[in-house]
Structure formats: C-alpha cells, structure tokens
Amino acid sequence: MAKKGVLLINVGTPDEPTVKSVRNYLREFLLDPDVIDAPYIIRQLLVRGIILRVRPKKIAPLYRKIWMDEGSPLRVYSDRITKSLNEMVEDVEFDFAMRYGNPSIESGLMSLRDKGVDELLLLPMFPHYAQATTESALKHTYKQLKSINWSPKIIEMGHFDTDEEYVIPLTNSIQSQLDNDAHLLFSYHGLPVSHVKRVDKSKNHCQKVSDCCSIKSEANSLCYGHHCMNTTQTVVGLLGLNEDQWSISFQSRIGPVKWLEPSTMDKVEELVKRGVKKLAIVAPAFLADGLETLEELDIGIREHFLELGGEELIVIKCLNDNQDWVEGLSKLITKKFSNPVAA
C-alpha cells in the first residue's frame, strides 16, 4: 500500500526583515518569468537595474512592523498548519515549502522522500489558479523532483475556489467580524491582465465579453479573475448580502503593466465618496497572513481610509491555522487522494 505525503507550497518570504534578506527574496521572486513575463533582457534590467536598487530599502521596514517572535508570519502560520495536519490526518506525511526562499521546495521534497512517501499530493496554497502562483510552484516542483531523481506518483490539488471545505471556514471568519452596517470588500491579490488573457484559448471571452469574470465558460475555466468572482459570489450567497453591501478589488500591484481592476486603493476611495463610513476587508486569495494583509491592508489601507474620512476599518484575518479551516483542508486532501482525477 502506497505511503502518502503532501507538500504544501506557499509563495515565500524573506528569512529576516533586513534589506539584504528582502533583496535576496525579491531577486528570486521577480526574476521568475511566470511572475514578470517580459522578455529576459527587459526583466533583468527592470528587476536588477531598478526594483532591487529601490524596493528592498522600502520594504524591509514594513516587514519589521509585522515580524512575529517566531519569525515571518507567513512561515509561522504555514508551519502551524502543517503541524496541525500531521496531528490530525493519519497515515499521511506533511511538509511545507516556499516557492521563493526557505524552506525550499527541494528540502520539502527530500524530507518526504526520506520518510518513504511514494504517492505525493502537491498542494499550492492558492485557492484560485494563476500562472504566477500555482503554475510557477508546480513547474519548479517538477524541476526539483527531476533534480533529486525522485519519481513518486503525483497528484495535483488544483484550484478549490468554491469547495465547501474552503468557503465555509472563510464565510465563518467573515461572519464573526461583520456588522450589519459595514460594507464588505473582497480584496484579492492583483494579477496582470496579460496573465488572465493567456488562459483564454478561445481569445474571444477574456476582457472582450461584458462581465467576463462572472460568466462560466470553457474559456475561463482556469481564469484567476473568474475564480475570484466564484469565491466572492459563493460567500456573498452564504452571508445573504445584497448587491450594495459588498465590492471586489485587487491589491499589490508591481510595475507599469495593465492589472485587473479596480485596485483596492481606488475602490476604497470610491466607497468613501459613496458615504461608506464602516468598511470590512477580507483577502480570500491569502490563506495565511503576510505582508499584503498585515501591512498593506491593516496599516496602509487603514491609514488611507481614515484620512479620506472613513470612521472604522475591520481587516479580517486570514484563515491561518483556524481549527475549522485546518479540518476543511484535511478533508480536501482526503477527498483528493480518494478521487485524484477530480480537479
């Protein structure tokens, strides 16, 4: 009988909240062609010539604001989730890795190999498929599997944007924080429009059909924007919200290319102009808190909202190691092992 293992993969984090460590992390992250898909020379000039000269000095102090006693929040919560799963699920070995930084995907794979695993579930911790997250993580994992000469049976988790094991814990986390008089903003990680257009093999749907992300089509079956809208509409239905009680936006932009809209900053400004005084923000694309939620939303966006005239901002924490989410994740994993063909 095959010994099962699971590798949980998140984006990554610097090892320390220092300029040097942040620079090393950003170099690996931004030079990935699946993140910035410009031609090689342009990507090198942009990242090495501009971004790495400026951003590390700006970002390192932001990491220091959110750093936990145990280390980077993203790494701390990833570790806690993994330990909880190891205690909860019998006869399955769990480990976690970062696509960029440490612990590396190579080290996670070697750990599971050394534990005798011969049936491996690859679980990028992204509910919504994207080239820059899920695809990059999987491509790098297969590269490392080849490098260490290991050939277990492979299962891929796939996206789980509407699976009840994910959306119910997400809904519960929102419901416990949401007051009746608060407007709910779903803030997803941003993505260049070129990335979502690329998955539309028909070339006739994405950004060409009105409300293209809201319409289910074979053309957008792997569209990040469509997956984000699926999660939003599912949670809105579970919460019983009216159309004027919620909005959707995209945060964390890098570079001058066209991104999915509206931006979170622009949407917050629009909501204040509409008279919204109490705002709740949830970031469903992030399964564990990190810089984008703890600093960008809970500090940066909070300050901007209050400066514009807003009165109260609630930033709902990510699912992290919440018990109901870890239980839901364990069920997702068990279901995938039982039915490995299902997406």
Image (cartoon, rainbow, N blue to C red):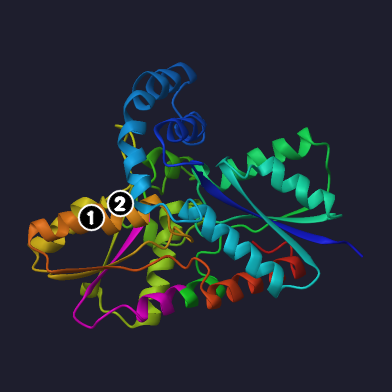
The residue sitting at 15% across, 63% down in the picture is 271
Mark 1 to mark 2: distance in Å?
6 Å
The residue sitting at 50% across, 48% down in the picture is 130
Per the rendered image, the range of residues in magenta is 170-188
Residue corresponding to mark 2: 296
Residue type, label 1:
Ile
Q: Answer with left or right where residue 23 lies relative to residue 236.
A: right
Residue corresponding to mark 1: 301
* Above-or-below relation of 125 to 165: above
* Residue 199 in the image, given as x and y percentages of width and height: 50, 44
Category of crowding for the residue at label 2, using alpha-carbon neighbours closer than 10 angstroms: few (below 14), some (14–19), many (at least 20): some
185 falls in the magenta region: yes
Residue 23 picture quarter = top left
Judging depth in this view, the residue of 57 and 188 nearest the camera is: 57
* Residue 71 in the image, given as x and y percentages of width and height: 49, 51
The reply to whether residue 126 is visible in this rendering is no
* Residue 268 in the image, given as x and y percentages of width and height: 19, 58
The residue sitting at 44% across, 26% down in the picture is 38
Residue type, label 2:
Glu
Instruction: Classify mark 1: helix, strand or loop.
Output: helix
Q: Going by the picture, which residue comes out furthest to the front? A: 69
Q: Answer with left or right where residue 242 lies relative to residue 269.
A: right
79 falls in the magenta region: no
State if disc 2 and disc 1 touch (CB < 8 Å): yes
The residue sitting at 45% across, 33% down in the picture is 26
Residue 45 picture quarter = top left
Q: Going by the picture, which residue comes out furthest to the right? A: 1
